[in-house]
Image (cartoon, helix red, strand yellow):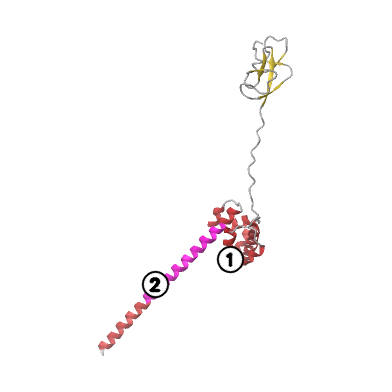
Amino acid sequence: MNNISSNISNFLAKSNYSYDYDAGGGGFLAFFFWFLIIIGLYVYTSLVLMKIAKKTNTSNSWMAWIPILKHYLLCKISGKSIIWFIMFFFPFINLVAMVVLWAAVAEKRGRPAWWGVLMLVPIVNLVVRGVLAFSDVPGARQEKSAPAVPEKKKPQVFSMASSKTGMACSRCGASVSESDKFCPDCGAKVVKKQGNFCPNCRAKIKSSDKFCPDCGAKL
């Protein structure tokens, strides 16, 4: 009789241990499974938001990977004011903000605005994000930054100073003739000034001057 009781006790002890072990292992696997799903969803939503930001030429697309800043980035993409970003911090109101912002994003990507309502539907909202990120529609509006227009450089114009010794370029001092439109040495465009000028300092001089009144150079 004692042997029977002992065998039953051993069996129950082993059964309880096996049950506890299986339950613990199953709980860990379930936790790990959901952890992977959450990480995968976060990576996916961040990736598509960054892609949309780049396709709409919105700056700071890296914000898509930061939990709070990703809502601010969504606000920038949609072109709405920062008030809509603040609305994300209030329950129920954040749902309205999400619909309005995604509706604006959908329009920018060439899709109908009512797609914003689909963001309230589980799984469907993931598909909509992917379509907006990776599918292009001809004629979709993009906030293209205006290309920098290089400033046209005006040609430098230098005077062709005349003196008793002849004509000289006021840029490099090389001798030029009255028929020259450009200096033969430096290539500067020259224009003729009325009157006589010192070939050294380009100061205006009189025909009777033998020396420049400004620099004293012999004329």
What residue is at 54 percent from the left and 61 percent from the top?
45
Q: Quadrant of residue 120?
A: bottom right
Q: Position of residue 73 (x, y in %)?
A: 59, 56
Q: Quadrant of residue 72?
A: bottom right
Please give the residue where the numbered disc 2 appears in the rendered image.
Answer: 25
Q: Quadrant of residue 140?
A: bottom right
Residue 67 seen in the current view: no
Packing grade of label 2 (10 A; few <14, some 14-19, many >=20) is few
Q: Residue furthest bottom?
A: 1
What residue is at 42 percent from the left and 70 percent from the top?
29
Q: CA distance from mark 1 to mark 2?
A: 33 Å
Q: Could you say whether the residue bearing mark 1 is in a helix, strand or loop?
A: helix
- For badge 2, the amino acid type reads Gly
Residue nearest the viewer, comparing 55 with 215? 55
Where are the magenta residues, as a range?
20-49
Quadrant in the picture for the N terminus: bottom left
Q: Position of residue 94 (x, y in %)?
A: 62, 64
Instruction: Answer whether residue 28 is magenta in the image.
Output: yes
Residue nearest the viewer, comparing 129 with 16? 129
Please give the residue where the numbered disc 1 appears in the rendered image.
Answer: 125
Quadrant in the picture for the C terminus: top right
Where residue 216 is drawn, which disc sits there?
none
| Chief secondary structure of the magenta portion | helix
Vertical placement of 118 versus 10: above or below?
Answer: above
Vertical placement of 6 versus 106: above or below?
Answer: below
